[in-house]
Amino acid sequence: MTIIPKTQVLPKYAVSYVRVSTAKQTGETKTGIDRQEQAWNKWLDNHPEYQPWNEQFQDLGVSGRGDNRMRGALAQFVEKAEKGIFPSKTCLVVESLSRLTRETQKEGLRLIIKLFDLGFSVSICEWGGQILTEEGTTTWMQLTGAFMAANFEVEEKRSRINGYHSEKIERFKRGDLSVHFRSRKHPNQKTFYPFWLDFDEETKKFSFNKKSEWARQIFELSLEIGAIEISKRLYEKGIRALRDKRKPPGKHFIDDVLTNRAAIGEFQPMNTTKTESGGMLVKNRGEPITGIFPPLVTPELFNKVQIKRKRRSRNKGSTPPPRPFTKIRHLFNNAIFCRECFERVVFRAVPKAKKNDLENMYYYYECSAGYNRAVEICNCNKRFNAKKVGVDFELDVLNRLQLFRWASYFTDEKHDKAVRVANEKRMNLLTKREDAKREVKRIRENLDKLLLSEHVSVIAINRISELQRKAEEQYQAADDKYNESMIEESHLKMRKSGKAVESEIQKRIKEFKETGRNDVNQRQAFSRWFLETGLVIAIDLRTGRFEVGMGKVEKGFLVELDRSLEDIAKHMKQGNEFVDNAGNPVDLNHFIKQSKEKKFESLPGRNKRVRIAGQRDHKEAQSDNKEAFFIEIVEKKRALR
């Protein structure tokens, strides 16, 4: 007798994409997130054959006019789709087509074609939730008409907004300030007027606050000294940055104050446009309007300061060349930290024309604390020139990444262990769900018996009904958790690991080095990948030496750096044999002992850095199945304020 095995039916998945253009819409029910969430839940109810993907993609406060496609959550979704992370026949669900994109008909259709080519279908809740595929007879006709309508709506809205702003500017000129300015809800709230002023909505008038005293001092000091020295003197007087009270007002903040024409009462309307790479370009909208703000300084003092600043500038020529807006200069955004204090490192691109290169740029890294003279946090006031003759920091990092033993981090053992843990978690949740199910059944049977009894008490019925409601809620919660764990386990089983991951990463880095460093879109994609992996860089700004590892960041501060990827690559040669710096074979314990000898190290600001070394099981490491790991933890004790 031949037994025909049952064909396994693979689950179909649906992915939700949510987008709102402004931050205010996140709290609204009609045009914000709530409405889109309701549409998503209703779609799932109407399509029980689909399971929700465990990750939802949201662009909050992001325009659909290119931003979401270039660098938002939609861009991340497409990137993951290209890597094959989603199963075939996955459906992308959006509330309306305008949530997906508000670009022109041509660009919108390109996006849809790309999704179809990747094996996706698309469903638009507003159109009744039908699932659109490229084989559909009316699909292209529907999409073409919808994109035309959406683009027309965008252009009409833009025209209304431009008209509103033009009218508002005319009202400014007549002295009507009620249409643009609001009082601050908290001291550091962003407003359309300078930090040294407050606005009274009842009287529609501005008044100076306490910050105006030291804002005026900035102008007076600028007649004699530069921005860095001004920052130092303000810090000595107890004046701190507006947002981080540990740090002094920064040099660039002071430069912005000194060039802000609001100091002489002028208001400059601005206009924003998008660059090809999706960045925001701000330009002046007409001439400044005088008499809007009470003047902080006289026009004579303001002009004297501008002359002094130009004389102190190293660039004695005319206006320096504009900064390029078509390239992303910093590849490791939000992932690079100072080696001395573990605060964020800031990247600066400074234009400096040369005879043979009028668009020359200097690239600098500086500690966000030490370079701003926050001495109780960090003493590193040096900045590192990241690209000059003989120095290419970005390329050095890429070369270092290519040496990493990625397979030792994304090991098959780790993957198998994660799958086992996920399976155990699912089985435990299954037990809890079945217990909750039995409780619901028991209470329901008791309620039926009570209703059939001769002496029925209304109080008893109400009480047991309440117990039944709570039991059903507990069952529903347990069922949701079980379904989530089932999806999680399914995703883990499909995820690549070990050598497969290493090969993929090595290929990505190699291709980026060869063709992607000068391509805007590839730089954006690589920067996102670097941040998503959890990689961080700790750099010594005095020497340019750096370390790369898996980091844990809390509130912008690096609290943990796992250097095992780098240290294993540094001390292990081919054949999984550990060597010292001279290349001589040594025992694994040599490195563990060496690291433990320098366990504690004092840091500025009463911080402590702890180095830990150890060994863990790993079949690819050595004959004794051990692998070295090195972890650095910073214990941060913030100064009292």
Image: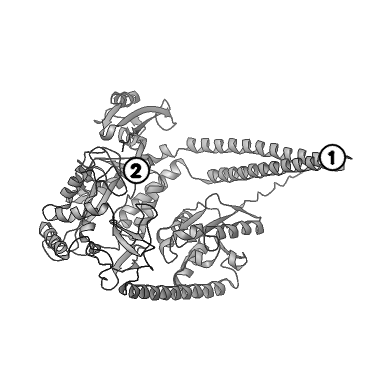
Quadrant for the C terminus, please.
top left
Please name the residue shown 31% across and 55% down the image: 514
Task: Mark 2 vs mark 1: give the one in front.
Answer: 1
Q: Position of residue 87 (x, y in %)?
A: 55, 53
Vertical order, 250 against 572 (above or below): below
Please name the residue shown 24% across and 65% down the image: 265
SS at mark 1? helix
Vertical order, 137 against 484 (above or below): below
Snapshot quadrant of residue 236: top left
- Can residue 92 be seen in this snapshot? no
**10 Å crowding of disc 1: few (<14), some (14-19), many (20+):** few
Identity of the residue furthest to the right in this view: 454
Instruction: First in sequence, mark 2 or 1: give its number.
Output: 1
Rounded to the nearest angstrom, the CA distance separating label 2 from label 1 is 64 Å
Residue placed under numbered mark 1 in the picture: 449
Snapshot quadrant of residue 379: top left
